């Protein structure tokens, strides 16, 4: 069974606008950058002033989406390579290779391997077959079916794009929803379960969603490493907890109106040679990701997550499971977007802008709890109206810079993880994430449904993260460390 990869899915929430509007926004972004440059004190290091201007330009362009998101990332990399590295005689010279290294970061290769693995799973139809098979143990009762849909969606979203997972699960859920009598609110509840579980499921693994990669790279730049197993160890409790809350919320709001309602999944399971290759590759890759701490401890074999990620990339391309067309259609724009975020953080560190921010912002009297709460609320607010990746890209360097000046290294790790995870809970509006947009486009739910569940989920999940997240992450880091 071979399927065409999901390609034409909503990747941007910016409405179509006249050219003159976007041009005006670009001019406004450049003017804002110039204003920031000249408004900063002359006593500030010149590289830091220039980096601040680049940051402001990128911020305006990312928020307004006057140009594609990945194009703004390229502008960040180009701006840093030209404006920060060609000047000589500075106290802290910067090499252009330091900036270009963002495109070759281990995190980029981690996500590339994840994209290739996910594309192989999609192409061979393994996602639909597994989803249907995994649904059977949940029975036919509406509550069990709803739990099954959310569990399976979150599971796939841990390893696949949230958008692709939603597109796949919507196809599986629509026949289930049509088994529910017209007018029964449970039909809408089933459909709503998909986007919200997909958004939340991305927090479960380092490759689940780009904000996770941004957090890992920000920590790596500070000499702090978190491996695949450690991430899952502290993300899964938060994931399970929030999924349980979301299930309860959906079942209360969209309880079946027909007593004795039963919903059943019907599917066929087919195993081809290429599908077998994908299954084996996925199993080996996941085993290496999860087992790397024990391989290092007992056998002295150090296998960084990004090194393991080239296994599926090599195997699936060499066996022609992934063709040249498949390879060319990977989410390269997402990789460039992540690289732009990495370059932004790296530029702030190399120019000393991060240190200047720490000294300038009134955070010395702020408790660590308040720092986590402020950063999480900030990224959720931004992520509600713009790309989660962009929101994290903007907030993460600031959060890390501030935390590095007032918190211990373990606390910096906790903050970075919490900001990345919190961004995935910004799901209050139909435009907040592509999964929400896909569910809305199914014509089985309306804007009011998405906003009602989305706002409640956003509020409840953010409270859970802020109040319990730091303790969970700190505990896991101590146990595995």
Image (cartoon, helix red, strand yellow):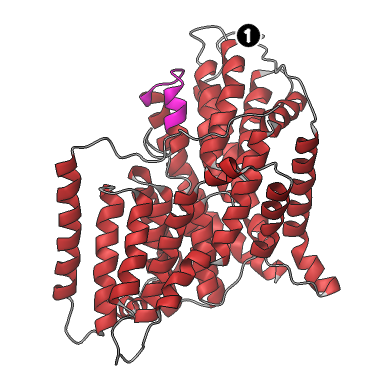
Residue located beneath label 1 in the image = 259
Question: Closer to the camera, 243 or 332?
Answer: 332
Position in image of residue 279 (x %, y %):
77, 41
- Tell me if 326 is positioned left or right of 382 in this view: right
Question: Closer to the camera, 468 or 29?
Answer: 29
Is residue 255 visible to the viewer in this orientation of the structure? yes
> At 51% from the left edge and 41% from the top edge, which residue is drawn?
199
Q: Is residue 441 magenta?
A: yes
Position in image of residue 257 (x %, y %):
55, 11
Question: Closer to the camera, 24 or 391?
Answer: 24
> At 55% from the left edge and 55% from the top edge, which residue is drawn?
468
SS assignment at label 1: loop
Region rendered in magenta? 437-447
- In the figure, 12 relative to 56: above or below? above
Quadrant hosting residue 168: top right
Which part of the image, by quadrant, shows the C terminus? bottom right
**Identity of the residue furthest to the right in this view:** 298
């Amino acid at each position: 069974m071979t399927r065409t990869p999901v390609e034409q899915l909503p990747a941007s929430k910016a409405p179509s606008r006249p050219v003159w509007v976007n041009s005006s926004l670009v001019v406004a972004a450049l003017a804002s950058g110039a204003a920031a440059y000249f408004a900063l004190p002359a006593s500030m290091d010149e590289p830091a002033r220039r980096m601040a201007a680049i940051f402001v330009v990128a911020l305006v362009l990312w928020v307004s989406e006057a140009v594609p998101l990945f194009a703004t990332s390229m502008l960040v990399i180009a701006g840093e390579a030209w404006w920060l590295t060609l000047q000589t005689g500075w106290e802290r010279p910067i090499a252009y290779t330091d900036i270009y290294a963002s495109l070759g970061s281990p995190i980029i290769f981690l996500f590339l391997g994840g994209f290739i693995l996910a594309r192989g799973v999609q192409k061979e139809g393994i996602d639909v077959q597994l989803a249907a098979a995994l649904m059977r143990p949940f029975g036919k009762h509406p509550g069990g079916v709803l739990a099954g849909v959310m569990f399976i969606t979150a599971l796939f979203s841990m390893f696949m794009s949230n958008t692709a997972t939603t597109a796949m699960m919507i196809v599986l859920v629509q026949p289930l929803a049509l088994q529910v009598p017209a007018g029964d609110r449970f039909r809408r509840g089933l459909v709503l379960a998909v986007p919200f579980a997909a958004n939340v499921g991305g927090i479960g693994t380092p490759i689940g969603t780009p904000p996770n990669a941004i957090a890992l790279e920000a920590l790596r730049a500070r000499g702090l490493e978190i491996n695949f197993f450690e991430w899952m160890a502290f993300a899964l409790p938060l994931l399970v907890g929030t999924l349980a809350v979301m299930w309860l919320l959906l079942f209360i709001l969209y309880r079946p109106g027909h007593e004795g309602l039963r919903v059943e999944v019907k599917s066929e399971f087919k195993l081809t040679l290429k599908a077998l290759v994908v299954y084996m590759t996925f199993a080996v890759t996941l085993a290496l990701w999860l087992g790397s701490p024990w391989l290092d401890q007992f056998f002295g074999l150090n296998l960084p997550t990004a090194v393991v990620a080239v296994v599926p990339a090599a195997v699936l391309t060499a066996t022609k499971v992934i063709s040249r067309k498949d390879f060319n259609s990977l989410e390269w724009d997402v990789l460039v977007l992540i690289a732009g975020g990495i370059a932004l953080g790296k530029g702030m560190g190399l120019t000393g802008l991060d240190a200047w921010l720490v000294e300038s912002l009134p955070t010395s009297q702020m408790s660590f709890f308040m720092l986590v709460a402020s950063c999480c609320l900030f990224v959720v607010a931004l992520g509600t109206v713009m790309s989660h990746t962009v929101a994290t890209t903007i907030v993460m360097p600031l959060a890390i810079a501030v935390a590095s000046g007032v918190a211990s290294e373990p606390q910096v790790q906790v903050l970075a993880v919490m900001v990345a995870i919190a961004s995935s809970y910004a799901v209050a509006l139909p435009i907040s994430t592509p999964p929400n947009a896909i569910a809305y486009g199914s014509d089985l739910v309306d804007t009011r449904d998405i906003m009602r569940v989305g706002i409640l989920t956003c509020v409840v999940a953010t409270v859970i993260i802020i109040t319990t997240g730091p303790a969970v992450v700190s505990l896991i880091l101590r146990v595995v460390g």
